Amino acid sequence: MVAKAESQEIEFNTRQKYCEIFVLLLKEAKIDSKLVSFHKLLKDFCEICLLGSCDQLLSHMASKSLASLVYFQLKEENALNVTWLTFSLKTLSGFPVNTQVAECLWTLTTIIKDMLKDEVLTKTGILKKLLAPLDAVLEGFYNSILFHHFDSHHYTSPYSEAANNLISFIDLLEALLASRIELELPLRCQRVLFLKVSYILKLISSSIHYLIKKKLIMLLKKCVLYKSREDAKSGSLFLQNPSLYEDMLALSNAVLQVVNLAWLNRIPFSEKASYFGGSETVPGDGTQGGTDQTVLRALSLVVLKALEFKFQNSATEFCLLSKSFRLSRCILSYP
């Protein structure tokens, strides 16, 4: 229905009818509340089932419908759905007591991604309206989920609830990183990945599943390759974007600090080479399993970029110090 209401191929009067239906669904049928509560009902149903297998397709479709609805209201009414916002704030702030957070994270990630794909929409105001109420809670959730003891068996399988929560959050961090370019002054939730990257670095060297390690390393790669809107268009220096300069410096310092403490030696790589369609060697191929070259290259790039920025920063500090020194001499020699 959202797709129909937004389609330019459908007559304006018909699209207006769809919008009127949405008003009825929200105000009278309270469809947003029903979609929000659907996840809990589904989880409760699964707990009393003999097989205990949750219908992931139904859960996914409920999240997708809710994300479409929230985004549609943001665009058309410039208003954030209060029911969804309340649900998100309660769910994320209740972690780790409440462990059912994956659907909430996935919905928010989908909204951000849909927003970034929209070529017509002016994203700055609407993105701030979406993220500002969640800013403090998202930073608190970052601290909570990444400060866990990850040597637990709950994280050694990518199919566990704990691992699913973490993977969903990594996807959200990636979306927040991509959305940062739309705001001149990024929110704290868009900067926390840079400022508290030490949590990520500790997680990579822990005993969590290799898939999660790989996603985190690829996320770090996107961080060091990140460019602001000004940098992307005009090639200007980091100094013209103070928040990005500060964030990159924090990330570089953290990376180089752990590298100096032999962090790289504690990162296990996949024992088998990756192949299209699986990781097993073809019988009779004779190829020996080795390290994951994709991850190895990404990790090398992270370290090299951290070194590069550190050198640039040191050179910049030296130039500023020299200018200050010359200025001081001029002032002191002035009659």
Image (cartoon, rainbow, N blue to C red):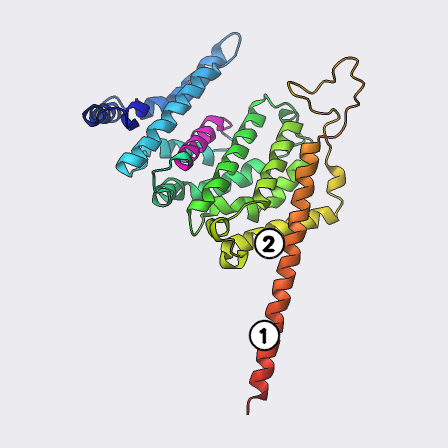
In primary-sequence order, the first of circles 2 and 1 is 2
| Residue 206 shows in this picture | no
In the picture, residue 238 is in which quadrant? bottom right
Q: Is residue 289 above or below residue 144?
A: above
Q: Position of residue 90 (x, y in %)?
A: 42, 33
Residue 103 sits inside the magenta stretch:
yes
Mark 2 neighbour density, 10 Å: few (under 14) some (14–19) many (20 or more) = some
From the viewer's side, name the closer residue of 199 and 122.
122
Q: Confirm whether residue 239 shows in the render.
A: yes
For the residues labelled 2 and 1, the Cα–Cα distance comes to: 22 Å
Residue displayed at 69% across by 50% down = 257
User: In the visual, does 220 lie left or right of 187?
Assistant: right
Specify the amino acid type for callout 1. Answer: Ser
Q: Residue at x 33, y 28 (%)?
A: 69
In the rendering, which numbered label is found on residue 249?
Answer: 2
Secondary structure character of the magenta stretch overall:
helix
Residue 324 numbered mark, or none: 1
Q: Residue furthest bottom?
A: 335
Residue neighbourhood size for the residue with mark 1, other residues' Cα within 10 Å, grouped as few (<14), some (14–19), many (≥20)? few
- The quadrant in which the N terminus is found is top left
Is 35 left, or right, of 109 in this rendering?
left
Element marked by disc 1? helix
